[in-house]
């Protein structure tokens, strides 16, 4: 769906003014980091730029240390008609919200900057590179092309997106360009220890309590090739946890030896929200697409209708089928099977 490149985008953005920058619902570090870094870069050029929340929801408290994070405006509350809509870290209207979609439709010109592979294009111009580890790497490059000084704020926001989308430089997308970009960001003023302390070393007590529940409930299947667990609505009330407190739990499931795919489910009342992570070359985006979702090869998500027991049964069937089918070849390829 790419129909431009970053130098052309930099030229075109430089000629425009009055931007809104929007990401996806349940914004993560890459989404928030991309939005803020681009907002700062455009403002350094003297432009008007506003960050929108696709949905009226609180920003994950772990990300509120980022400069500018208090400036987000829910799309539904946004007044006025900007000239240019920039979507970052989000390729599809379905991953925004109707309010954000309406603003996109009202803008005379629109741009996507992203690393999610999809077939459609929702904006006039799109630069999408699925090979890149984080959208903030693209924003970092774009800021350089815009000719602004990539200051410590921009560096911190971009580094945050990179460290979160690579799972602290541990996932399969951690490559030489990602590490080289991280080094540039640190040289420009990003502080990895602060970012890690805020994001990874500041979990709430309810989040740890949710983790205990998730571990207690964990199902292992396909001879230990998948680990699956879930959080029920009552768990939030019982522990005092908020939605973001459930985000780290999938990493616990994936850390178990022999696990090739981790799946974490969350009861949303009328629907079940799910996340997949693959530790080998299993394509969980394909699996998520069969459930109406999508994402990256090694990290994907979806929403299915409830109740939880039915969702668990359906997803365990899919995982068993997929992982037992590929067990032989994968064990040879990765050597990551349990011994
Ligand atoms: P998470 O598990 O962190 O919510 O999502 C993992 C990845 O999958 C993210 O990069 C996100 O873009 C993608 N993803 C999550 N949920 C959905 C969904 O419902 N639809 C699509 N197309 N992608 C999703
Ligand atoms: Mn994201
Ligand atoms: Mn991303």
Image (cartoon, helix red, strand yellow):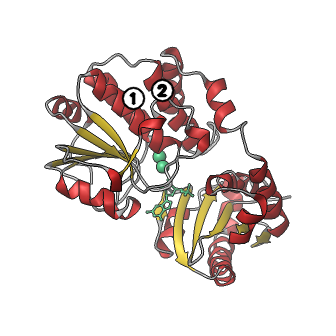
Callout 1 secondary element: helix
- Pinpoint residue 169: horizontal percent, then vertical percent: 61, 36
The residue pinned by badge 1 equals: 140
| 1 or 2: mark nearer the eye | 1
Q: Residues within 10 Å of mark 1 (few under 14, many from 20)?
A: many
Q: Residue at x 65, y 68 (%)?
A: 265
Callout 2 secondary element: helix
Q: Nearer the viewer, residue 115 or 68?
A: 68
For marks 1 and 2, the one nearer the N-term is: 1
Ligand 3 within 8 Å of the CB at mark 2:
no
The residue pinned by badge 2 equals: 181
Marks 1,2: beta carbons within 8 A: yes
Ligand 3 within 8 Å of the CB at mark 1:
no
Label 1 and label 2: CA atoms lie apart by 8 Å
Q: Residue at x 57, y 46 (%)?
A: 60
**Disc on res. 227:** none
């Amino acid at each position: 769906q790419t129909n431009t490149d970053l130098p052309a985008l930099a030229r075109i953005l430089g000629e425009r003014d009055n931007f809104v920058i929007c990401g996806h619902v349940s914004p993560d570090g890459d989404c928030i980091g991309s939005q803020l870094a681009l907002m700062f870069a455009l403002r350094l050029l003297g432009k008007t730029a506003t960050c929108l929340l696709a949905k009226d929801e609180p920003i994950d408290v772990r990300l509120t240390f980022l400069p500018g994070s208090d400036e987000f405006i829910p799309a539904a509350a946004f007044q006025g008609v900007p000239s240019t809509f920039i979507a970052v870290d989000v390729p599809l209207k379905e991953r925004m919200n109707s309010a954000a979609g309406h603003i996109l439709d009202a803008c005379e010109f629109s741009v996507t900057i992203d690393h999610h592979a999809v077939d459609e294009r929702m904006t006039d111009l799109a630069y999408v590179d699925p090979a890149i580890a984080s959208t903030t790497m693209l924003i970092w490059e774009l800021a350089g092309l815009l000719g602004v000084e990539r200051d410590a704020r921009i560096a911190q926001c971009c580094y945050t997106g990179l460290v979160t989308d690579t799972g602290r430089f541990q996932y399969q997308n951690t490559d030489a360009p990602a590490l080289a970009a991280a080094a540039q960001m640190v040289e420009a003023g990003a502080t990895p220890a602060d970012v890690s302390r805020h994001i990874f070393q500041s979990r709430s007590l309810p989040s740890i309590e949710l983790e205990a529940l998730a571990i207690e409930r964990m199902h292992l299947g396909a001879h230990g090739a998948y680990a699956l667990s879930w959080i029920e609505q009552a768990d939030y009330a019982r522990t005092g946890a908020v939605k973001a407190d459930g985000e780290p739990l999938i990493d616990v499931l994936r850390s178990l030896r022999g696990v090739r795919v981790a799946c974490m489910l969350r009861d949303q009342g009328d629907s079940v929200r799910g996340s997949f992570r693959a530790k080998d070359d299993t394509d969980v985006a394909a699996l998520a697409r069969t459930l109406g979702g999508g994402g990256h090869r090694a990290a994907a998500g979806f929403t299915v209708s409830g109740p939880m027991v039915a969702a668990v049964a359906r997803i365990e069937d899919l995982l068993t089928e997929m992982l037992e089918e590929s067990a032989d070849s994968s064990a040879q390829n990765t050597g990551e099977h349990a011994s």
